[in-house]
Image: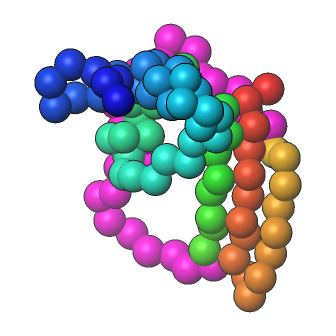
Amino acid sequence: LVAGEGATVDPARVAPALAERGLTRLLTEGGPRLLGQFVAAEVLDELCLTISPMLTAGDAQRIAGGPVLAEPDQFVLASVLEEDGFLFTRYRRS
């Protein structure tokens, strides 16, 4: 499976390369940098986000790190589950 050059991966090539093998669903977990790469490539269809009932402070980055988008991506809420104060949300590209 080749979806980039050398040791890098081109997010825009990942889904088509996997679809050629019959793998049409892709769940990606990673940090802000990986998510930012998929956002910048405009290949993110859904976002699952867990909201915790805890508050802290610090120098954390945004959920997605990377280049500034010309226009923010618009997503709509698809579902919400709650358990013990935690919110498990799923957003889809509008």
The picture places residue 5, in percent across and down from the top left corner, at 21, 19
Query: Outermost residue toward the front?
Result: 21
Magenta residue check for 79: no
Compared across the picture, whether 56 is left or right of 3 comes to right
| On screen, residue 74 above or below 27 | above
* Picture quarter with the C terminus: top right
Look at the picture and state if 1 lies above or below 48. above
Q: Position of residue 88 (x, y in %)?
A: 71, 66
Between 7 and 19, the residue placed more toward the observer is 19
Q: Is residue 91 above or below residue 7?
A: below
Q: Residue at x 77, y 82 (%)?
A: 83
Residue projecting furthest to the left: 6
Residue 77 is left or right of residue 89, and the answer is right
Q: How many marks?
A: 0
Which is more toward the observer, 71 or 1? Answer: 1
| Percent position of residue 68, x then y | 41, 21
| Quarter of image, res 56 | bottom left
Can residue 10 be seen here? The reply is yes
Q: Residue furthest top?
A: 70
Tell me: 4 left or right of 76. Answer: left
Q: Is residue 62 visible?
A: no
Q: Quadrant of residue 75?
A: top right
At a point 61% along the width and 33% down the height, the residue shown is 22
Which of these two is toward me, 44 or 27? 27
The residue at 56%/79% (across/down) is 54
Q: Which residue occupies the foreground of this view, 22 or 50?
A: 22
- Residue stretch rendered in magenta on the structure: 53-76
Q: Choose top left, top right, bottom left or bottom right for residue 74.
A: top right
Give the prevailing secondary structure in the magenta stretch. loop
Vertical relation: 23 (above or below) 54: above
Residue drawn at (58%, 27%), measured in percent from left and top? 19
